Amino acid sequence: MQAAPALRAVSAAEKFQLPLPLPQVLSPYSTAHGVDRYRLTTRPARAQILPGIWTDVLTYGGHFPGPVIRARSGRPVSVEHRNALTTPTSVHLHGASVPADDDGSPMDTIAPGATRRYTYPNRQPHATLWYHDHAHHLESEHVYRGLSGTYLLTDADEAALPLPTGPYDIPLAIRDAALDTDGQLLYTMGDFQHRTTLLTNGVAYPRFDVAARTYRLRLLNTSNLRSLRLRLADSTEIVQIGSDGGLLPHPHPTDTITLSPGERADTIIDFSRYPLGTQLVLENTLLSGGPADQLGQVLRFDIVRTAPDHNHIPPVLRTLPPLPHPTTERTITLSMDETATPTPRPTSNGRTYDPNRIDTHIHHGASEIWTLTNTNNTPPHNLHLHLVQFRILERNGQPPTTPETGLKDTVNLMPGETVKIQATFNTYHGTYLYHCHLIDHAAMGMMAQYKIT
Ligand code: C2O
Ligand code: CU
Ligand code: CU
C-alpha cells in the first residue's frame, strides 16, 4: 500500500479571495475563406490556483484551463495544435460532429514537437462543447493537469433569443483536484478519494463579482471522476435552459443541478432578487464521504453593482425534430471489479478497450436504441458517444425528466441504473469511440469503438 499523500486543505481565509477567471476568448489568426483558423501550443505553465501559490500545470496556449473558442454553425473552425510536451497528445472536441480523422482518436496522436491541424465543420446546431486531451492512457493525467477548454457553438436560432450575452454569458468549468502541501497537483490514476479541492475556471473557490441582473452560466463538470450536485446556499431558483447539446425545449426551474463528468448544464440565475452586498455561495451537496469544508463549496457570488437588464427566458427555447423510427437495438453493460483497487479493470460489455477491435458495427443512416446499464453496486459510470447528440428515451423505465429531454452526448448511470437512448448515425462514416467519461475508467479500459459503414 502506498502511504497516503499529505494533502493541502484550503483554509477558510484562502477561499473566495481570487476573482473568478473569465476564460480568455481565443482570437483567430485568420478568418479568410469563411474559416476561422487558430493556433494553440500545448505546453507546461504555472497557474495561480490558490492565492499567492504557483502550481505547475499543463495548458493550451498558457491558459489553465484552455481558452474559449467561439464558433458559429455553418462556419468551420480549424485549430493547429503544436505539442510542446514530452508526451503524445490528441485533441478531441467533445460533443461535436466531426469527420473521424479530426476526432482526436486515442491512437492518432501528435508526437512531442509535432504539429497537426484539426478541422471542425460545425454542421450542427448551437451547443456548449468542450475540447480535451484523448491520447491513449495519458488522457486522464493530461486532462487532470489542465488540458481542457470550452468551445461555444452558437447559431441563428439561439442568437435570436433574448438570453444574456457578452459579459453575462460565462462558462464555469468545475473540477476537483488533489493538492499537496506545496500546492502542487497530485496525480494517481483512479484516485477519487484525495481529489477534494474544487476549482472553477482553474481557481480554487473563486469569488465572482456579479451585477444584480440575470446571468447565463454554462456549467461544465470537467472532473475526471467526481459527480457534482450544485445548488445556491439559499436553495433558490436556478433555471436550467440547456444541456450537453444546446437548449432544452423548455426552461426548467429547479434548485439543483446534477452533473456527472463531461456533462454540461446551461443555466440562468437572476441576481436581481438580492440586495447589493449579498454574498451567495454555490454549494456542492454530493460529498461522497469527502470533507464537507472542501467539497461542499464551489465559489461565491458577490452581488456588487446594478446593471440594466433587457434579457428574459422565453417559455419555448427550441423545437427538437421528431425521433426517427429506430432500426436496431443494442445493450451496453458498464461494470468494473469493485474489489480490485487500484486496477479495477473497467469494462463495457465485458471487454476492455482494444484499438484494433471494432466493438459495434453500425450502418450509415441507422437510428439505434441502446439500453445502457451500470451493473456495479458502488461506482457511478456514465456513457459518452463521440460524433452524435442523442436523446434519452427512458431512465429506469420512466420517461426522462425535463433536464434530460434535450440533446445529450453523455448520460449519467448511477449504480444499478438502466437508461435507454436513441442515436442517429447519419453524418460521417468511420470509427468513433464510446466510453465511460469518468476519464480514469476510460483510461483503464472502459472504452469501445463503433464503426459506421
Ligand atoms: Cu470528452 Cu471521448 O470524450
Ligand atoms: Cu467526446
Ligand atoms: Cu465508469
Image: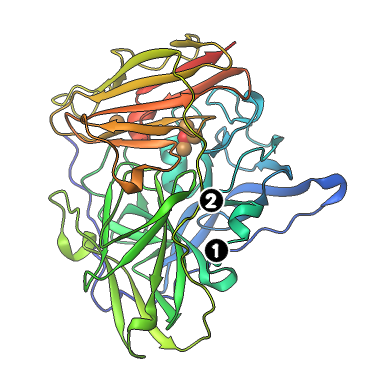
State the residue position of label 2: 149
Residue found 29% across the figure and 77% down from its top: 280
- Left or right of 354? Residue 273 is left
Q: Is residue 373 above or below residue 380?
A: above
Q: Position of residue 163 (x, y in %)?
A: 53, 66
Q: Earlier in the sequence, mark 2 or mark 1?
A: 1
Quick one: 427 or 146, which is closer to the camera? 427
Instruction: Please tell me whether mark 2 sits on a helix, a strand or a loop.
Output: strand
- Residue 313: image location, x then y, percent: 46, 66
How far apart marks 2 and 1 lie (CA) works out to: 9 Å
Q: Which mark is residue 319?
A: none
Under mark 2, the amino acid is: Gly
Q: Amino acid at mark 1?
A: Pro
Can residue 409 be seen in this snapshot?
yes
Residue receiving disc 1: 23
- Above or below, 331 relative to 413: above
